Amino acid sequence: MASPGVRKINFLHSKRLQGVQDIINLRKGGNATYESADIFNQILAALIQVVENDITEDIARSPFVGVGTDESTDRSTEKHAVFVIRYIKLQTASLKTTFLKMKSIRDGKVETIFNALKDELRDKGVKFRRMVGFGADGANVMASDMNGVTGLIHQDNPYSVCIHCVCHRLHLAVSQACKNIPEMVLLNDTLSTLYAYISRSPNKLQKFKDFAELIGQKAIKLKRIFDIRWLSMGEAVLAVLKNYEPLVMMIEDEAATGDPTAIGLHQQMTTYLFIALLHLTADVLSATNHLSRVMQYRDVCFSVLHGVFDDCIEVLQRLQNENGTFMQILSNELDADPIGMFKGHQITYQNRNARAGNRNYEDVVNGTRQLFLQNLLNNLRARFPQIPLYVAMQIFEPASYPPEDRLLNWGVDYLEVLLEHYGLPKTNKNGEQFAPIIDSDVVRAEFLPFKKLVSHNRGMFNLMVLVLCILVGNAEAERVFSCQNRIKTKLRTRLNITTLDQLIRLSYEAIPIEEFPFQRTLLLFDAQPRRI
């Protein structure tokens, strides 16, 4: 709030004071200054209309679309549903995934979300049967084929493929692999305690940086582990590995003063169990976090994930019997120091606690390694079943193609799997019949020419577009919520949903200012009736 006697200066007025001639000349009838909040809203609406018109036209031209959704509560505790859309931009023959709409919803019930989805597609002129893919998290309200949004979608559109976000599935697979392994739970707890102990105390944080500087290292910022994002442990583990020596020096110094938390941390951090599991986890998370990053690419599709997933499984299987990069580094360093030192600190190899059975930590690590990796492999296979429909999509991935002498019969079985889903009539739970959305005979006739890349046929193109429009993850919706939180800050909690949606649209599209169609915006702005 402005102080008494101080004039509130808005953006346009400040530019006039700076002498910007175009702004000085922006007057009509001598009294229109365009400085009111209402005029700003009109200008924003014109900007948004130009951007949305282009997106709406592109969506209307795309044969099929895929939609992703998620729910969130903003800083003013208002509940929102966000929708993102994937479609083919025919002008550039490219796949595009972008923000569609943020809508205020009164509750998170199935019918509320489903109706909001249908209303938005209707507003964009998209028939519901053109939505061939729906992506969401694994909550029952979304994923249940009985009573969830997925079930309602299949009532109106049985051809739509509803996907439980692959990123969420990966997170669950990794977190549950550790859930019942005491040593992995202890590692997680120790890292969380270490982060809180140092990061929440400016004095301890500075002491840690001082020790790092003393030994000529650059202090790497410690990372917090989030319960809802177990894969965040990858960054936390790497930060501790890179900072291990100054961290132990600082903890040891604090333990000497009798600090009980420091004493406990020092005992844990100087055991072979902690150090080895830290390196093992770094190896495992190097593989799973790479898979997670690929899954979060904006326009990733199943044909890409198929190969990356198989690579991840292969790496994890090797880690069961071989040392990965980080475990090999640890082994080499320990072998080079026969007296059991690591980074200048004495390491404990034996748990002498009578209740623990005087366990040898090397045996514990080997057992934990096998159990953790086997649990992880089982969870990944269970949560990412090689469903024939998804595997069949590799016919649209050139890297999957065999040499030309084997091309004639390759992919025919995959094609039949896709045609069985999209090229046959379907019946919903109420007995309502739905005609196929793909002409199977046309597609079969076009498959060989398509494989030889000598022609572009409509039937095969439609099937290819259909597959590409299926969203495999929900990362895009979460990016929208990140954008929302950057805009609707604690100081801007009174932003209404309409203005918030418009500002997200401008921010999300990120159109360079020199490329923005301001002339079209001006035409729209001038066409609106207003007093002068």
Image (spheres, rainbow, N blue to C red):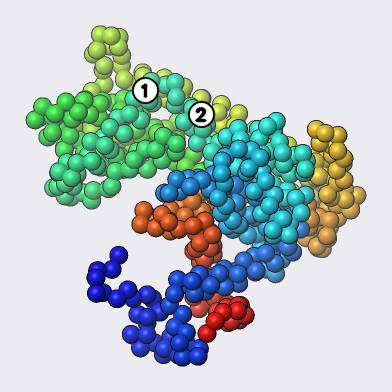
The quarter of the rendered structure image containing the N terminus is bottom left
Q: Tell me if I can see residue 16 in this picture.
A: yes
Q: Tell me if I can see residue 504 in this picture.
A: no
Q: Residue at x 84, y 56 (%)?
A: 459
Q: Is residue 363 left or right of residue 287?
A: left
- State the separation of the CA atoms marked 1 and 2: 15 Å
Residue 511: x percent and y percent? 52, 70
Residue position for label 2: 376
Q: Residue at x 37, y 43 (%)?
A: 235
Residue 531: x percent and y percent? 54, 81
Q: Is residue 48 above or below residue 168?
A: below
Identify the secondary structure beneath mark 2. helix
Residue 283: x percent and y percent? 42, 37
Q: Is residue 344 left or right of residue 420?
A: left
Between 56 and 459, the residue placed more toward the observer is 56
Label 1 packing within 10 angstroms: few (<14), some (14-19), many (20+): some
Q: Is residue 35 above or below residue 447?
A: below
Q: Residue at x 60, y 57 (%)?
A: 100
Q: Is residue 229 above or below residue 510?
A: above
Residue position for label 1: 183
Residue 253: quarter of image: top left
At label 2, which amino acid type do we have? Leu
Identify the secondary structure beneath mark 1. helix
Residue 275: x percent and y percent? 30, 30
Label 2 packing within 10 angstroms: few (<14), some (14-19), many (20+): many
Q: Is residue 394 left or right of residue 408?
A: left
Q: Residue at x 51, y 25 (%)?
A: 374
